[in-house]
Image (cartoon, grey):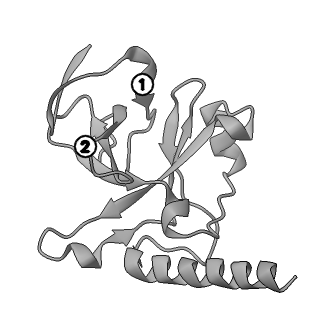
């Protein structure tokens, strides 16, 4: 089916539609979204299928922070109908300042959790004091680089 989005008309298959039963914070009235690529991989876009002006940049959070941990709250597991861990996709919302993209931030506190089996999704607030709604992507990637270098040096030493 064709949908008008911020990026023009896009053909979205029924199985690609994500349903946010409670909407998203600030967009509670919108419940139908899709994740699309705009050639900026690994950045994707969570586009509203009900309001063509709403689109949020999202990314796989492990690309930015290799040691990211997501413990999906029990009520979210139940409301999304999650049966198996492998049926879950996790996305983090980015804020990309138009005048200063180098100051891009990622929301690690409230990831978007998707059940790939039934298309149900929700933005879930994690109970982890390490995470905030604004982490600088550059800083997190430098931190992750250090973690990977440390892990590689320990592997070589063995």
The reply, left or right, for residue 148 in relation to residue 24 is right
In percent of width and height, residue 124 lies at 54, 52
Q: How crowded is mark 2: few (under 14 residues within 10 Å), some or many (20 or more)?
A: few
Reply above or below: 119 against 1. below
Residue at the image position 34 percent from the left and 33 percent from the top: 33
**Residue 40: image location, x then y, percent:** 28, 52
The earlier-in-sequence mark between 2 and 1 is: 1
Res 137 quadrant in image: bottom left
Tell me, yes or no, if residue 144 can be seen here.
yes
Q: In which quarter of the image is the C terminus?
A: bottom right
- Compared to residue 120, the image places residue 146 above or below, namely below
Instruction: Point out residue 89 in the picture as x, y percentages from the top left corner.
Output: 56, 42
Q: How crowded is mark 1: few (under 14 residues within 10 Å), some or many (20 or more)?
A: some
Query: Mark 2 sits on what residue?
Result: 38
Q: In this view, does 110 lie to the left or right of 26?
A: right
Q: Quick one: SS at disc 2?
A: loop
Location of residue 12 (image quadrant): top left
Q: Name the residue under label 1.
A: 16
Quarter of the figure with residue 17: top left
Q: Is residue 147 left or right of residue 123?
A: right
Residue at 59% over, 85% down? 146
């Amino acid at each position: 089916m064709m949908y008008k989005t911020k990026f023009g008309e896009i053909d979205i298959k029924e199985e690609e539609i994500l349903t946010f039963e409670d909407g998203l914070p600030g967009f509670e009235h919108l419940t139908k979204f899709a994740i699309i690529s705009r050639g900026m991989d690994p950045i994707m876009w969570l586009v509203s299928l009900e309001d063509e002006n709403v689109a949020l940049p999202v990314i796989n959070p492990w690309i930015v922070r290799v040691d990211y941990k997501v413990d999906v709250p029990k009520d979210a597991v139940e409301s999304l109908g999650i049966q198996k861990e492998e049926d879950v996709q996790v996305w983090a919302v980015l804020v990309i300042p138009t005048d200063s993209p180098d100051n891009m931030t990622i929301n690690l506190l409230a990831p978007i959790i998707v059940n790939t089996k039934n298309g149900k999704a929700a933005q879930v607030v994690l109970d982890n004091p390490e995470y905030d709604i604004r982490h600088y992507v550059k800083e997190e990637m430098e931190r992750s680089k250090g973690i990977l270098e440390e892990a590689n040096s320990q592997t070589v030493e063995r």
